[in-house]
Amino acid sequence: EAQVTQNPRYLITVTGKKLTVTCSQNMNHEYMSWYRQDPGLGLRQIYYSMNVEVTDKGDVPEGYKVSRKEKRNFPLILESPSPNQTSLYFCASSSSGDRVPYEQYFGPGTRLTVT
Amino acid sequence: EDQVTQSPEALRLQEGESSSLNCSYTVSGLRGLFWYRQDPGKGPEFLFTLYSAGEEKEKERLKATLTKKESFLHITAPKPEDSATYLCAVRDLYNFNKFYFGSGTKLNVKP
């Protein structure tokens, strides 16, 4: 089954404790992206990656890191989480043509709470 | 700054009562407008892509249309299973790796 998987689905942590949210897709997609979703603000793009070793900032990259060492995986790293990073996080992937991404397929989400 | 605005924020319909959701956008150039459906506790699910003014796409009771400054998602004779949040996103012509989402319209269809 074609899918985007994220782990963990739920995470409660404390301020400053480094964490990683994993994302994996099995559709051989070049493009992958991370979003956070907050009430009233919609989905906001954190980082995206056009291909292996190619990543760039979205609209809200502060406090986050990403890496793309393999095509299928795109982990999101919070090196020192703060309460304002409490949110619902989605990973997405899409195929692309001429380096332009098409419609995105989303994972099930990771609900993060930072206390 | 690129912006996507969706209205209304919430919409309550009776089963069979047709209506439209609006997505207006301000981007320097449009290279694709996307509609997604999101059910509670799940990730958004792709519905349609529109590329140019005048384009229309249909799927069951849903029809998406696009003008130069906005898109509409028309829901004809909705059923309770159409209840969800509908999200609109745009991809900028000059920064086509970035996507800008609206905050969504929460649709509730009562039987």
Image (cartoon, coloured by chain):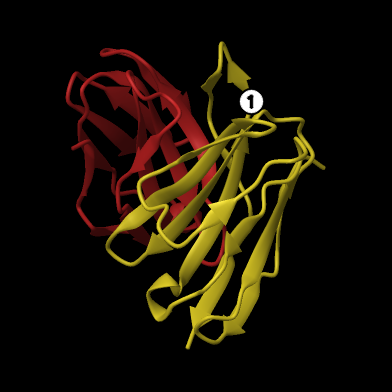
Q: A78 above or below A65? A: below
Q: Which residue is drawn at 62% across and 38% down?
A: A93
Q: From the top left corner, tell me how far across and down residue B44 is, in percent.
A: 52, 49
Q: Position of A92 compared to B34: left or right?
A: right
Image coordinates of residue A2 in percent, x first then y, are 77, 40
Q: Pinpoint residue B68: horizontal percent, then vertical percent.
A: 19, 18
Which colour represents chain B? red
Which residue is situated farthest in the right direction here? A1
Left or right, residue A34 beside residue A42: right
Chain letter for mark 1, please: A
Q: Residue at x 21, y 33 (%)?
A: B25
User: Tell me, what hue is chain A?
Assistant: yellow
Q: Is mark 1 on a helix, strand or loop?
A: loop
In terms of depth relative to the viewer, which is nearer, B34 or A99?
Answer: A99
**Residue B20 falls in image quadrant:** top left
Task: Report the label total.
Answer: 1
Where on the picture, by quarter, is residue B110?
A: bottom left
Q: Dot 1 surroundings within 10 Å: few (below 14), some, or many (20 or more)?
A: some
Asked if one can make out residue B40 in the rendered structure from this viewpoint, the answer is yes
Residue type for callout 1? Ser
Name the residue tied to disc 1. Answer: A95
Which residue occupies 61% across, 74% down?
Answer: A18
- The quadrant of the picture occupied by the N terminus of chain B is top left
> Which residue is pictured at 38% across the width and 46% down the height?
B87
Quadrant of the drawing holding the C terminus of chain B: bottom left
Instruction: Tell me residue A43's x, y (percent).
Output: 39, 52
Can residue A108 be seen from the camera position used here?
no
Q: Which of B84 and A101 is in front in this view?
A: A101
B26 versus A74 height, above or below: above
Q: Would you place residue A19 above or below residue B34 in this image?
A: below
Residue nearest the viewer, comparing B27 with A80: A80
Most foreground residue, B104 or B106: B104
